[in-house]
Amino acid sequence: MASNKKTQINGHALKPESLMMGYGYNPQLSEGSIKCPNFQTSTFVFQSAEQGKDFFNIVSGRKPLPEGQQAGLVYSRFNNPTLEIAENRIAVWDEAEDCVVTGSGMSAISTMLMTFAEPGDVIVYSEPIYGGTDTLVNVILKKMAIQAVGFLSSDGQKGLKQALDTASSLGRVAVVMLETPDNPTNHLIDIAATRDQIDALTTKQDKAPILAVDNTMLGPLWQTPLAHGADLCLYSLTKYVGGHSDLLGGSCSGSKALISQVRKVRNSIGTTMDTHTAWLILRSLETLKIRMQAATLGAEKVIAFLAQHPKVTRIDYPGLLKPDEADYAIYQKQCQGAGSTFSFEVSGGESAAFSVLNSLQLIKLAVSLGGTESLAQHPAAMTHSGVPKARREQIGVTEGLIRLSIGIEEPDDLIADLQQALA
């Protein structure tokens, strides 16, 4: 009995938010349970030794998967029904052929980079970028003879061109890694224009670089990188997709050809997601759209208050872009919304920022983003503290910068909290 992968009714295409309720799951295979169970098992029983041999040959890549069939279940580090259904549904949101889920956002990024970058290769990445990614490409992978060249997202395609030229002089460019909007300053990078530059570079080296986009800040509701030319779309599922600050997870979506390579590395090094987390992801995907919409509306109201406050000297938020700003055209063609995570700067540096953070009563002082509750943190002292101070200042991560992730509380209550904290 096949799983439910119907995407239309009499020619009417079903929207992702509708497909999150049942796509990839057949209740008749699970005693009629309306919700997908958590298949909490480490291993699966074979019907015969011959079947076990065949399943292993397929899951290891030694034998191609027959057209129209799913790989047989072997061991939960390789595959598991709960994980596969979560992967199917994330792929729907990303308009992707396939997806793999991992134990965290960083494990998704590290697994992807280990798949496509080899000793002697170079990774080009946008700055600022998540602190963990920065450490990975500039410290960890450097030990493996993989070099990294960064460019400021605020420098746009000119900065990218310079970075690609520098990287090409050092070795083969294996991956171009973008974070757009960037974290925490919300600059945008034109994915389609980046694709054009990568295609031009491909004529000068033996393999085409992979264009990977960390879509955590806006996706999957407000931005679809694959539709603009990205090869891979990555998430920290911990954030908006998980949405409840109660799990760690990551994912990587793209074509079947690329994802099969990522899956092989994931299965080998063991960065696979656990089944309970996958089950929680399925729960969260059902409310993803309404959560992200509500949080974005709340953020817009909070920002309107902050924009009028005399102690606030700067706000980094795509929704505030003006037509004469470089990022405005990118936002208009690439994004469907501005999200609910933004940064604002207060005059007075670290001491002033810490005073605000220590005075908050409703908004929680914690890192992460995308949960139902609103969170505030100090990037220079927390998420980006591993980035050298000179580089932090260059990329706009100042001592007075505070990052806010707006949840689904009543916006007027959040404004009251910020008003007293800024007093």
Image (cartoon, helix red, strand yellow):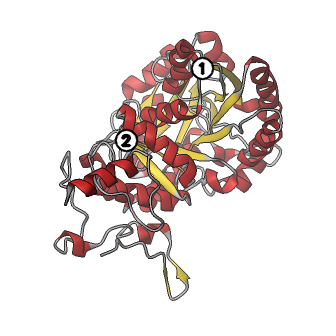
Quadrant position of residue 30: bottom left
Front position in the image: 232 or 47: 47
At label 1, the amino acid type is Pro
Alpha carbon of mark 2 to alpha carbon of mark 1: how far? 27 Å
Q: Is residue 24 left or right of residue 129?
A: left
The residue drawn where x is 34% and y is 34% is 270
The residue drawn where x is 49% and y is 62% is 92
At label 2, the amino acid type is Gly
Quadrant position of residue 354: top left
Per the rendering, the mark at residue 249 is: 2
Q: Is residue 91 left or right of residue 53?
A: right
Q: Which residue is mark 1?
A: 119
Front position in the image: 61 or 402: 61
The residue drawn where x is 62% and y is 58% is 336
User: Quick one: quadrant of the N terminus?
Assistant: bottom left
Per the rendering, the mark at residue 24 is: none
In this rendering, is residue 32 above or below 417? below
Q: Give the image location of residue 421, x and y in percent.
A: 43, 30
Q: SS at mark 1?
A: loop
Would residue 81 be seen by someone viewing this image from the given angle?
yes
Between disc 2 and disc 1, the foreground one is 1
Front position in the image: 164 or 352: 164
The residue drawn where x is 45% and y is 63% is 66
Q: SS at mark 2?
A: loop
